[in-house]
Each structure stands twice: as structure tokens, then as C-alpha cells.
Image (cartoon, rainbow, N blue to C red):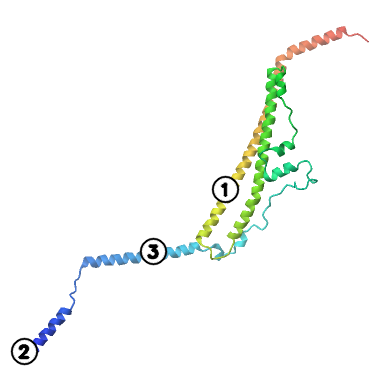
């Protein structure tokens, strides 16, 4: 009986020792796991702070103030030249239409200007080379002025026509910008910025066209002033060069006239 009890106890102790776990402690693995856990916790904290910052940045200004105060109450409108009524604009109807919509052909401008006679017939005449040179320079001034006025009229009409469309686009963009809705995403705000940049680019292009037209007008005025000064200077130089001979001829002619004059 004692042997049986001892045998059973030994078997029971063996089974308990067999089911028990042997604890193994590795300092390197423990340190690696600790560092990994700390790094993951840092990344989670960083991403949480980034998300909070993005949410604060994504908040619209309408959350803090009323955006209607940034809207222009009465923006200036583009003036439309009257041309539909034939009685109101009897002689410049086509030119008024060109100022509204543009005229690349220049027909409207030609219709309101004094026509220039054909100067090619003078080539057959026996003209002095200096006289023909002076005449051709004046004709060139008129042609340059016509070309500049035609281009400026066309550009002014395009700017006026596109200006009305730009004004409508700006009004729609303004209504979207001052919309107090909080449902708009960051992408919608970026699209508004892109639309505003596009409208600004178009307006800068229109201003550049107008500046080019003004520059062309100044060039024509400068050429006309230069030709005038050149003509005056040529007359002065001719007076100095031919003055003595002209004076002597005038004195001789006057003396002969006085000597030969008789009472009728």
C-alpha cells in the first residue's frame, strides 16, 4: 500500500512538472520590444496631433465671422455703347458696335474716317526726290495711325466684351467664397483659389493689351512730332542756306521794279 501511494505521488509530481512553463528572460528582446512600443506610441501621438492641426487649418473663416462683409455691395459695371437704335447713333453705329465687340477687319473704323486719296498716281509725275521723300513719310504716318487705331479699337471691344463676362464670373466666385456653409472641403477652397488666379491672369492679360495699345498711340504721336520738328528744321536750314541768294534776288527784283515802274 505504501509503495502504491508513493508511486502515485511520483507520477502526479511528474505530470505537474511536465505541464509547467519554463520562463526564459532575454534582455535584448525585451529592450527591442520596449523601443518598438515607444516608437509606435510616438507615431500615434504625432499623427493625432497632425490630424488636429489639419482640422484647425480646414476650418473656414465663416466659423468665426460673417463673410458678407467682404462682398462689394455695388461693383462698377461695364458701360455698353448704344448702337442698336439707328436714330440715336446715326453715323457711328458700326463703330460703336466695334467698341462693344471688337472689329479685326477695321471696316468700322474706315467707315468713320476721311478716306485718303491714292498717291500712286504721283509716281508718274516728275517730282523732286526730296519732295517725294517728305510726302511718303507723311503718308506713312497716316497709315501707321490707321493701323494703330484699328488694333486699339479691336482690343478695346474685346476687353469690353470679355469684361462683362469676367464680371459675371467674379460675381459667381464671390457668392461661392462668402458661402457660410461648413460642408465645403479643403479641395473646394483650393478650387476657389485656382478660379481667382485664373481670373486674375485674364485681367492682367487684358491690361497688357491696353498698355500695348497706349504704347502704339504714343509711338504714332512721337513719329508725328518728330516729322513736324524735322519739317521745321528743314525749312530753317533752307532759309539759312538760301537766305543770302533769296535776299539778293529780292533786292534786285525790287530795284528793277522801282526803276521801271511808271504811273498808269
Tell me what residue is drawn at x 64 percent, y 53 percent: 167
In the structure shown, which secondary structural element does the residue marked by tag 2 occupy? helix
Spot occupied by residue 110 in the image (x, y as percentages of width and height): 72, 36
Question: Between marks 1 and 3, how big is the CA–CA gap?
Answer: 40 Å
State the residue in front, 72 or 17: 17
- Report if residue 224 is visible in the image: no
Tell me what residue is drawn at x 64 percent, y 54 percent: 168
Q: Residue 201 bears which disc, if any?
A: 1
- Check disc 1: other Cα within 10 Å, few if <14, some if 14-19, many if 20+: few
Q: Residue 46 bears which disc, if any?
A: 3
Q: Residue 3 bears which disc, if any?
A: 2
The quarter of the rendered structure image containing the C terminus is: top right
Above or below: residue 30 compared with residue 90: below
- Report if residue 50 is visible in the image: yes
Number of marks present in the image shown: 3
State the residue in front, 260 or 125: 125
Nearer to us: label 2 or label 3: 2
Amino acid at each position: 500500500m505504501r509503495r502504491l501511494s508513493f508511486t502515485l505521488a511520483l507520477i502526479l509530481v511528474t505530470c505537474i512538472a511536465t505541464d509547467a512553463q519554463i520562463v526564459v528572460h532575454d534582455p535584448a528582446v525585451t529592450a527591442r520590444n520596449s523601443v518598438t512600443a515607444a516608437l509606435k506610441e510616438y507615431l500615434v501621438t504625432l499623427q493625432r496631433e497632425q490630424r488636429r492641426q489639419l482640422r484647425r487649418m480646414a476650418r473656414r473663416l465663416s466659423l468665426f465671422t460673417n463673410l458678407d462683409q467682404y462682398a462689394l455691395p455695388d461693383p462698377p459695371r461695364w458701360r455698353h455703347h448704344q448702337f442698336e437704335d439707328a436714330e440715336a447713333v446715326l453715323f457711328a453705329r458700326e463703330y460703336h458696335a466695334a467698341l462693344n465687340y471688337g472689329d479685326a477687319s477695321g471696316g468700322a473704323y474706315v467707315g468713320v474716317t476721311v478716306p485718303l486719296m491714292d498717291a500712286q498716281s504721283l509716281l508718274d509725275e516728275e517730282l523732286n526726290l526730296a519732295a517725294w521723300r517728305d510726302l511718303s513719310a507723311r503718308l506713312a504716318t497716316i497709315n501707321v495711325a490707321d493701323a494703330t487705331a484699328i488694333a486699339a479699337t479691336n482690343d478695346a471691344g474685346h476687353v469690353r466684351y470679355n469684361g462683362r463676362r469676367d464680371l459675371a464670373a467674379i460675381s459667381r466666385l464671390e457668392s461661392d467664397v462668402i458661402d457660410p456653409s461648413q460642408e465645403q472641403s479643403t479641395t473646394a477652397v483650393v478650387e476657389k483659389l485656382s478660379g481667382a488666379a485664373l481670373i486674375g491672369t485674364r485681367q492682367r492679360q487684358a491690361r497688357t493689351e491696353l498698355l500695348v495699345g497706349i504704347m502704339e498711340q504714343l509711338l504714332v504721336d512721337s513719329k508725328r512730332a518728330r516729322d513736324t520738328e524735322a519739317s521745321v528744321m528743314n525749312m530753317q536750314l533752307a532759309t539759312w542756306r538760301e537766305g543770302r541768294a533769296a535776299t539778293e534776288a529780292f533786292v534786285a527784283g525790287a530795284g528793277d521794279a522801282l526803276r521801271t515802274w511808271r504811273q498808269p
